[in-house]
């Protein structure tokens, strides 16, 4: 059974199974990033206020207090146990859409020099804005989509020289 390691504010770490998650008494509001959670007769109002899908980092507001949250699934944990990380490869020559969505904005242009972790574009998926960051330092060779385009998972978005 898969487990998720959740780290909050870089200090607290929790482990959840899929069964633990499905047992949570949570009701989604009309906004897909907001939930009402009831646990041990206590009510919590939560909202995902920002997300970085590639880095699996989120900012979650619980009763108006913000928490920085990172999530590692089973594969992430296995890779870390081997001494590697998904972001360790600096030979990345392109950025592909991690999920289907709408390309809201492009922050770079062809021939522009970028640094690692610099925002490249914003992809809206499931009504959440996801900032796609540069995986490495480099120069933009081509941009495969335009602002306002609907993109498919795996579609080439940016190519590096």
Image (cartoon, rainbow, N blue to C red):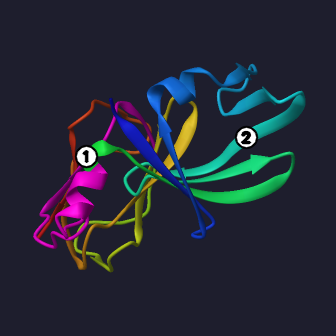
Q: Is residue 7 above or below residue 74?
A: below
Q: Is residue 77 left or right of residue 61?
A: left
Task: Work out whether mark 1 precedes mark 2 in sequence or the reverse, and give the earlier one.
Answer: 2
The picture places residue 107, in percent across and down from the top left corner, at 43, 63
Q: Which residues are magenta?
A: 76-104
Disc 1 element: helix
Q: Is residue 86 visible?
A: no
Q: Spatial distance from mark 1 to mark 2, Cα to Cα?
A: 26 Å
Q: Nearer the viewer, residue 140 or 123?
A: 123
Q: Which mark is residue 9?
A: none
Using the rendered view, name the quadrant where residue 35 is placed. Answer: top right
Q: Residue at x 66, y 25 (%)?
A: 24
User: Quadrant location of residue 132?
Assistant: bottom left
Identify the residue position indicated by label 1 in the image: 75
Give the residue pinned by disc 2. 47
Quarter of the figure with the N terminus: top left
Q: What residue is rendered at 26% in x and 33% in y?
A: 153
Picture quarter with the C terminus: bottom left
99 falls in the magenta region: yes
- Percent of width and height locating residue 88: 21, 71
Foreground tag (1 vs 2) = 1
């Amino acid at each position: 059974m898969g487990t998720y390691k959740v780290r909050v504010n870089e200090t607290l770490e929790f482990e959840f199974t899929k069964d633990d998650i499905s047992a949570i008494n949570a009701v989604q509001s009309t906004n897909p990033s907001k939930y009402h959670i009831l646990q041990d007769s206590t009510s919590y109002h939560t909202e995902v206020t920002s997300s970085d899908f590639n880095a699996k980092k989120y900012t979650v507001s619980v009763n108006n207090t913000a928490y920085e949250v990172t999530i590692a699934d089973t594969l992430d944990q296995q890779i870390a146990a081997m001494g590697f990380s998904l972001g360790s490869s600096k030979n990345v020559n392109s950025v592909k859409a991690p999920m289907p969505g709408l390309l809201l904005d492009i922050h770079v242009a062809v021939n522009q020099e970028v640094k690692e972790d610099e925002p490249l574009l914003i992809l809206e998926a499931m009504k959440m804005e996801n900032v796609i960051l540069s995986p490495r330092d480099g120069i933009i060779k081509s941009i495969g989509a335009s602002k306002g385009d609907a993109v498919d998972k795996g579609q080439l978005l940016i190519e590096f020289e």
